[in-house]
Amino acid sequence: SIRFPVLGASAVLLAVGVLPGLVPAVPADTIRVIHHFGEDDGEYPDTDLVADAAGNLYGNTVQGGDYNSGTVYKVTKTPAGWSEAVLYSFTSGPDGGQAYGGVTLDAAGNIYGTTVVGGEFGACPEDGCGVVWKLTNNGGSYSHSVIHPFHGGTDDGYGPGGPLSFDSEGRLYGMTPGGGEFGMGTIFQLTPTPSGPWDEVIIHHFTGGEDGGGASKARLLIEDNGDIYGVATVGGTFGVGTVFKLSPGAANSWTYTTLYAFQGIPDGVFPYGGVIRDAAGDLYGTTYYGGLDDDGVVYRLTEKDGVWTETVLHHFDGGTDGSYPISALVFGDDGALYGTTSTAGGPADHRTIF
């Protein structure tokens, strides 16, 4: 089965001076540790952070917590500094376990996410097929519920390991790396119903061929018109991943288009982080391998007359710039791109923020 990489027990939350809007302005080369993780509140925080309107930060961990199955946490700025609270500890039972990728907030302050294992123990190679979960905000306390348990097999995916995305109608979207009609993963849609349960529809079954396969741990990019952009980690013409677009049609039909197939060294290989878009419509992302030194790349995709052309903006070399990026990029207020690498930055082999 396809699993997402766990590349080290990242043990801190960092406040970084170059990322506006999260922390007070500090010199660009200043990094402050705002929280040290321990086994009780979580290990392996392989997560994007999201912020609410008050500036509180939310994320999840893959391991640790009360049952060593991962946590959902909140970090709050106080006059005395930053304070972290565990909102939920997974058990790896019906509630799920091993939460990767990050969480999603709605307008009411409810929190949503996925787990790789737990849930219903169906036709899956791991300990359960994974779930989509919700933490309902009850005035500051949170109650956990499973809004969709995955079943594996050919109809449903399994092992979702990434954050979810809302569209303008309140539907949730995500991906699974395995299962589905061809065993290569799925893209799913969850629609809330008046009675409470969420209805699942698989809007694409990856084939592992020209469309790609394996999904990724990335958050899908959903445009106001309903178009969805994302990446598949493997597959495509050269077998090393794709960037795709899904366009909605009548009666919940969808048109899938492969925008670009990565070609291997010196091009990118295996995109894990998702894509972001600028005002001109160009797409940006990273790949885990590939480039001149096989340490990953930052790329841009530009569309003209329906044809998407790729430009590699940076080849990581495993030196002080780092290597093997797995996270998504973000735009700063200065128009620059920011991101992280997962290993090999400088003589101490540290991870980097670039």
Image (spheres, rainbow, N blue to C red):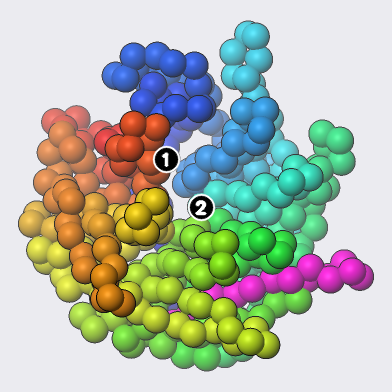
Hey, what amino acid is under mark 1? Ala
Q: Secondary structure at mark 2?
A: loop
Pinpoint residue 202: horizontal percent, then vertical percent: 61, 82
| Marks 1 & 2, CB-CB < 8 Å contact | no
Res. 9 mark: 1
Q: Is residue 354 left or right of residue 95?
A: left
Pinpoint residue 158: horizontal percent, then vertical percent: 57, 74
Q: Is residue 30 above or below residue 318?
A: above
- Image depth: mark 1 or mark 2 in front: 2
The range drawn in magenta is: 184-198
In-front residue for pair 131/305: 305
**Going 79% across and 52% down the picture, which residue do you hit?**
144
Res. 83 mark: none
Can you identify the residue that label 2 sits on? 101
Residue 197 part of the magenta segment: yes
**Going 15% across and 65% down the picture, which residue do you hit?**
267
**Going 60% across and 67% down the picture, which residue do you hit?**
173
Q: Is residue 118 above or below residue 252?
A: above
